[in-house]
Amino acid sequence: MNLCGYYPESINEGEGLRASVFISGCKHYCKGCFSARTWNFNHGEPFDDKRQREIIREMAENPLLDGLTLAGGDPFFSAAEASSFIDLARESIPGLNVWMYTGYTFEQLAARPESDEYGLLRRGHVLVDGRFEQELRDVSLLYRGSSNQRLIRIPESLERGEVVLWEREKVFM
Amino acid sequence: MSTTLPLFPAARSKEIDALEEITKLGRDIADSLDTETLRENANLNGDSFSGKISKFGSEYAKWYARLHILPREVEAAIRGNTVYVHDLDHYAVGTTNCIFIPFDKLLAEGFSTGNGDLRTPRTIMTAMALVAIIFQCQQNAQYGGVSANKIDHDLAPYVGRSFIKHFRKGLSYFESFKEGDEILAGSATPEGPADEEIYMDNTDLRDRYPHAYRYAYQETRQETFQAAESLVHNLNTMSSRGGGQIPFTSINYGTCTSSEGRLVMESLMESTMRGLGQGQTPIFPIQIFKCKKGINQSIGEPNYDLFLKAIECSTKRLYPNFANLDAPINMEYYVPGDPNTEFATMGCRTRVVADRFGRNHLSGKGNLSFNTINLVKLGIENGIVLGERKRADEEGFYEMLDEALDIAMTGLLHRYRIQAKQPAKASDFMMREGVWEGGDALGPDDKVEDLLKHGSLSIGFIGIAESMKAMYGKHHAENEDVYAKALAVVRHMRAYCDAMSEKHNLNITLFATPAEGLSGKFTKNDAKEYGCIPGVTDREYYTNSFHVPVYFQTSAARKISLEAPFHEVCNAGAISYIELDGNVRSNPEAFRKIVAYALDQNVSYFSINHPIDRCTSCGHEGIIGESCPSCGKKETEVHISRLRRVTGYLTGDYQTRFNGAKQAEVRDRVKHAGQAAPRQ
């Protein structure tokens, strides 16, 4: 698994201040992708144990973080390894909140409970799903690029067997 | 034998030198040859006619002050690049710096602009119009900023007056009118409650006269919103000082819990969010939200909703900033229930609270002047950076620091004596109308000294980071020992200020200088003298006061906790910033969390910088790269306005209105949080 980007504190991939980790490799090949170079699984640096622990330590030391976001590429093409990373992180940061970006739909991922992809899915709190569709592009959308993409509460959705959308708590606006 | 020959050739040549200097000075301005001078101040359009005319005046006044007024050692220290005298153009005439305006008093008693008398306003619409006029008049009486330290409390009574007016109207329209009444009958004033009974929070009133109350409530809200909108517009459009500058206005609010006061705040923030014209971000007034536990910091507290609104407004418009009333340094003179003792700022950061002569409140006084010390030069002279020694010469550093402090102090006292002997009439509006507390009791020719003593004289500093780098090879964010040494240097300066306060019986305070117009000058001169030293003189600017350098990569939390302890020491004011990248308006929770953390760490005054780019073609605001993400137009086709903050003030387009050093500083800013990662 390779790492093609890491922002220790980001406000752009999910609610609050989050560490954003971009995993290399994607086979969705969406037209208009903002970072086609990250499709390559060899792009970036090896996301080995040492680098993972570095990032986890930084996260653990940061009192302001709301959680971790996995993006890419598409982390679901490296599902088993990405799951291990989350597990490792939760050893130091119990209850770590995780958001994930994917080009798959929630329904596709939820359909095969025995798969590695499902394993990764159930480790997350919120999923931003769906391919980027250029004709549905809308810059005003929250945390996503095209209007087909959804912000989904993973645990509630898996429990009910239907998509439950994430909504901001009505503190602001 | 010939009288045309000079008696003293040396003196004669001095005169010729002087003439040459002053001729060059004029030519540089008239022909726009020196853009650094013209752009020295981001708030002044130095390319305009009026900007140039005012430059002629100020450049000559500076030249004159250096040649004829300044004490020799101060002049030498300026030339030696160790001390900077701010607003030197106002030195010879004795102008003072900034002030907190007692708007409550001026509005209640009415005032005169010099050309006309104004009565106390009967409505919030008029009151807010007068606020703009007062700001403008006062701005002409000094060289620094003008601030309202409690605008919510000051304006609440006028919202109340509007409410009474609308309520009485409502009574006559709705409550007294009955079936069968003559519709066109004259306005028989209905019996109604006394004025004292008519206020928004009176629930009896609401229950007894629901129609009139509702009418008055809606009308008052609407009027207050309109009043706030026009105030914000006025403060961005009216000029002062011969037309060259927009007044440097600041308004502080946050603690008034009456419905009237809350409406003032809500309206100001809503107007700010709506913006000017087609939705531009207002540059003025600087807005400061005063954070106080028990009033606006947690769910259930009366103004918590307004704190959240302040967060929302700041994610969209960069203001308000956040003042921390709970920081120990700001609690010292705080009297619950007396808003005039609540910490507030002059916007850029200036803090004036304590007064050894008893006026331990804010309005009616201000800072008189400040001089800034170049800590970097002292670091270079005594550090390891030039390779002249293996260990930093701390003794030498402190010796030179004390010398610089003495010179800065000499300059402050000398200037104070010039200021103190001015007659009241010189500051015109400020003394005549009692904007400076007690000024209205003076005759036009009375000296102002006895009143000015309540103000503060401040010593500022710049470049702790580069100074430490020059001394020890690392700056204060890179090494714990160096951090301790940096804090010790600042504490030493504070102790000096405290000692001088006793010695001279004046309010001498330590200031974390905002480096407008200065950040490049010190650096340019030091680079000329010592060459380009990596991490010290290799940039076009020095780092602000005690700040962690903008180019140093660290987390938001760490930057805050490193800078927080310095706030307590700088009793003349300080600010900390965090740089955020990305469209923070869509993630206010992240913003709120960072603000809350800064307050919790006892940062006295805090703000978050984030880019606001605006496509002038479609009006889209957010982050704009080479092309507008909304309309797709490229920067080569359409102007993209890029709003940034410099030394506390916003400026419309940093590429055209910032001076070179400031532009470089903006380019180098490391975002502590929220790298602009693209989205999927």
Image (cartoon, coloured by chain):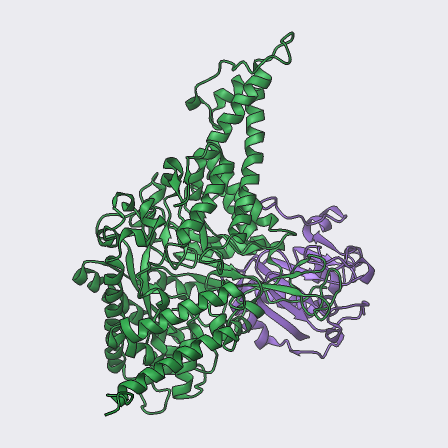
Chain colours: A purple, B green
Q: Position of residue B671 (x, y in %)?
A: 54, 68
Which residue is drawn at the image coordinates 29% and 48% (left, top)? B333
Which residue sits furthest top? B180
Q: Is residue B593 left or right of residue B445?
A: right
Q: Position of residue B131 (x, y in %)?
A: 45, 44
- Camera-side residue of B449 and B196: B449
- Camera-side residue of A77 and B96: B96
Which residue is drawn at the image coordinates 80% and 57% (left, top)? A136
- Quadrant where the C terminus of chain B sits is bottom right
- Camera-side residue of B216 and A132: B216
The relative height of residue B382 versus residue B519 in the rendered view (above or below) is below
Which residue is drawn at the image coordinates 55% and 29% (left, top)? B217
Q: Position of residue B233 (x, y in %)?
A: 55, 49
Q: Quadrant of residue B642?
A: bottom right
Q: Is residue B327 left or right of residue B493?
A: right
Which residue is drawn at the image coordinates 53% and 53% (left, top)? B236
Which residue sits furthest front? B1
Which residue sits furthest left? B503
The reply to whether residue B113 is visible in this rendering is yes
The reply to whether residue B303 is visible in this rendering is no
Q: Is residue A166 left or right of residue B409?
A: right
- Quadrant where the N terminus of chain B sits is bottom left
Q: Position of residue B182 (x, y in %)?
A: 63, 9
Total numbered labels placed on residues in the image: 0
- Camera-side residue of B166 and B579: B166
The relative height of residue B34 versus residue B430 in the rendered view (above or below) is below
